[in-house]
Amino acid sequence: MARLLITRRLPPRVLDAARARFDVTLREEENRVLTPDELRAALRDYDYVLPTLGDRFDAGVFADVPNPRCRMLANFGVGYNHIDVAAARAAGVMVSNTPGAVTDATADIALLLILATARRGGEGERVLRAGGWHGWGPTQMLGLPVSGKRVGIIGMGRIGKAIAKRCHHGFGMEVVFHNRSPVADPGVPARQVGLTEAMAADFVVVAVPGGPATWHMINAGALAAMRPSGIFVNISRGDVVDEAALIAALQEGRIAGAGLDVYEFEPKVPEALIALENVTLLPHLGTAALEVREAMGMLAVTNLIAALDGQEPPNRL
C-alpha cells in the first residue's frame, strides 16, 4: 500500500477512510507543526502527505529534496499559503485543498466576531466572571448596534458571499465589497467598490485567501480609511493584516474595535492585543465544529484517493 503521512490528529471517521486505502503514519500531536527536518522527511519518505496549517512546505524544503518520493500534498484546509504551490509543481508534487466544506462555519465566526465586538460581549463576560458586575444600569457598557449598518467585505469568494448573505438577510445591513476581480453575482444586493470605500464601512470583514498577493493587504494606509466608529474583523489569514499597524490604530483610538480569529505570527498573539478591552480574540475557531472538520478530512482523502487511482483530484490547485 502507498505510504501516507497525516501530520496532525484528525477525526476518527477520516482516519478510518484513509487507512482503508493507505498505509498511514499518524503524528498524534494536535498542535505541533512539522519541524524543518520532518518537512524534508515527509517529501523523501512518503508517497502522499496530508498536511495542514503551519506545515510550511516552502521553496527551500523542495530545493533540499530535489527528487521527492511524495506525489501529492493533500492540504487539510481551504487556505494553502503555507505551501509553495509553484515549487511543488516544479518538483512534480500535486497540491490540493478542501474548499466548500469550510464556508458556512467560517462565515458564522465572522458574525460572532462582529456581534461580540460591537456589543462588547467578551468584555462583558470578563467583567461578570471577575465579579465586577453590580447590576443593570442605563449607561452600562454601551455598544454599537449592528442592524441596518454598512458592512464592507474584503474578498467576495465563497466565504465573503456567505458573510454577505448573513449580514443582508439577518441584520438588514447594506453590503459593499472589494474584490481583486469583478464579481458578477455577489448573491445579495451589494456594490463592488474600491478598497478605500470598503474600509470606510461601519464594519469591515476580511475574507481573502492568504499568500504573497494579499500579504499585508490591510496595512496602515488601508486602516487609515476606517472611520473612528468602525470595527475591523479578520477571519482570513493573519498575515493579510499588518498586525503592528492594527495595534497602533486600536491603541490610538482611530478605530473602535476589532474581532480576530487569526494572527500574523500564529499561535503567538501580541500582549498589546490581549491588553485591549475593545478587541475580541478567538483561537482560530473558524472551522472548529466536528462535522466541518470531518467534511474537510473526507474531502482531503477523496483528493488523495483520486490521485492514487490515477484520476484528477477534484480540488487540485
Image (cartoon, rainbow, N blue to C red):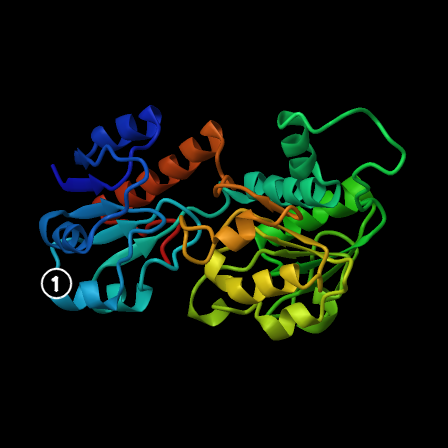
Residue occupied by mark 1 = 65
Q: Does residue 105 appear left or right of residue 124 in this picture?
A: left
Q: Residue at x 67, y 64 (%)?
A: 252
* In front of the other: 29 or 51: 29
Instruction: Label 1: state its secondary structure.
Output: loop
Residue 26, quarter of picture: top left
Residue 107 visible in image = yes
Q: What amino acid does circle 1 point to?
A: Val
Q: As displayed, is residue 236 above or below residue 89? A: above
Image quadrant holding the N terminus, namely top left
* Image vertical order of residue 242 relative to residue 260, above or below: below
Q: Nearer the viewer, residue 68 or 32?
A: 32
Q: Using residue 314 as the reference point, say whether residue 150 is left or right of it.
A: right
In the image, what residue occupies the spot 24% across and 52% down?
72
The image shows residue 35 at horizontal and vertical percentages of: 20, 51
Q: Which one is in front, 62 or 242?
A: 242
State the image coordinates of residue 200 (x, y, percent, origin top left).
Answer: 75, 66
